[in-house]
Amino acid sequence: MTDTATYVIDPIEREIFTYTVESIVEEIDINITRTAHSPLVYEYKDYCAGLLTKDFALLGQSQSNLPIFLADLGDPVSDVIDIIGAESLRAGDVVLTNYGEVSGQHLNHVVAFTPLFSREDEIQGYLAIRTHWADVGGITPGSLSWEGTDLRQEGFQVRGLRVMREGNVVPEVVETIRANCYMQAEVVGDLMAQAGACLVAAERWRERVASRWSGEQVAQLVAAQLETSRQLAARAVSELPDGVYEASCMTDDGGGVGTAPLRLSVKLIVEGDRMVADLSDLPPQVATPINAGKNGGAMSAMRVAFKSLLVPNRQADQGLFEPLSIVLPTGTVLSATDGAPMAHWNTTIPTMVDLFLRAIGSRLPERVPAGHHGSMAALMLTGRRADGTWVQYIETGNGGHGAHSEGDGFGPLKTLMHGDNKAIPIELVEGSAPVRFHSYKLLRDAGGAGLHRGGPGIERIIELLEPLTLSAGIDRTVDPPWGMNGGAPAQSGEIALLYPGTQTWQIISKVDLELPAGALIRQRTAGGGGWGEPVS
């Protein structure tokens, strides 16, 4: 290698560095799915892995998991380093945080991170992995109740807790976590998968990066990569006409039966090669658990929409989002603070991604699809086995995506905050939970009509073989997935119950219910909106 003082970045060397970074996060992605205990992680892909610089900027992120975690790992890691100090970290340390005030998501999303060292034994960055833990205690198994009114009711919080020191597990930390969970085997299994993957990443950084480039060379390569990404994104923004793009829609309610609907809105301002996402008109935070924090809520939603529309094929890093500014006052439903409950923080996120695209479509309908089903359509079932352990089944609904200028909408897929991650296989569910699937079918006519038709929804009917507790959540039934450029809106979804001995389905919304054996749950998801005037 060239001496540091005279080091000049070769374009080929820059590409080698970028793909080396990508290789590390992609290996960790595979490692997590191979070693995780919970199907919510290894099947549903509710996790992410990201490489951060020493200044907590995203350098690379895994791509086979939930996109809503896009570029939001830096703040939780930075918050912990402010507390414990980078100088206290040693190789092989793994640190945990799920502090809700900073992460902005429900407490089940626990970040584990480890330092990455240069050949000069200085911290060059961090590898962080967020995983959805099956349970973090609180007032209900699974920690996702609709009844909570404060974040502290939803489970325990850790903020800089070391679960490994210099490569060794700290047993009292693991046992303290175990003691505060309902689903202990699942939580500890996923924790060990996270911690092990952190150590693998640190070793790969040493082998592939620190052994090849000096600390100063890495700093220059990082700067070059981020600048390349910034230029690509800026060029894409500059291709949009200058001006204001706006969109809004109504939620079904304010996060609970009988609460007033909320108006969600997005205003985008394009000037040259920069875009401002102005979210100043979002409603104030609410007492129900549909709040999200600034970092993990609105900012992540805007980044997902920005990247998917403008730079979909570039590996995500901090430079990609430099042309995007987000205006967001504190204390809205998507920048909540002061212990606001967040168990169902994801309720409004799919709609916010959708509204970004709808705003662009208000002036450039050929650039974006119609509205997608946009609801988590979530089901969580929990119960206690005879041996005292807990069973859990969590699934969200696959529905239709909007049609676009070149063809029909696709589906059924999960929401735009999920990407293309798959549903948990029926066989796995029936083998691990006391349920039986009666039917699982496409709702082919759920998509909106148009020159191009919206994607289909699904219907699933599930029977409970034992008494279980249901937590259900659905939205976008009052203001259904919209059409684009003259296309028709889609059919909305619903969740309904049929109790044993009755003949009438009862439609439910955002509730926690104790259900008897023999009860049936019918989950229907919305289609996607149509695009263009229908041909008569």
Image: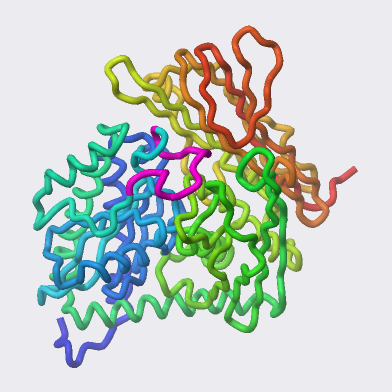
Q: Residue at x 59, y 51 (%)?
A: 348
Rendered location of residue 44, percent (x, y): 42, 39
Q: In which image quadrant can residue 54 be found?
A: bottom left
452 relative to 60 in the view: left or right: right
Q: In which image quadrant can residue 519 be found?
A: top right
Query: Can see residue 277?
Result: yes
Q: Residue at x 63, y 7 (%)?
A: 501
Q: Magenta includes 154?
A: yes
Rendered location of residue 273, percent (x, y): 58, 81
Rendered location of residue 419, percent (x, y): 50, 49
Given residues 434 and 172, the one toward you in this image is: 172
522 relative to 341 in the view: left or right: right
What stretch of residues is rendered in magenta? Answer: 141-156
Rendered location of residue 200, percent (x, y): 18, 53
Q: Residue furthest top?
A: 501
**Residue 424 versus residue 483 in the image, above or below:** above
**Residue 7 versus residue 236 in the image, above or below:** below
Q: Magenta includes 142?
A: yes
Given residues 478 and 181, the one toward you in this image is: 181
Q: Residue at x 56, y 70 (%)?
A: 328
For the C terminus, the quadrant is top right
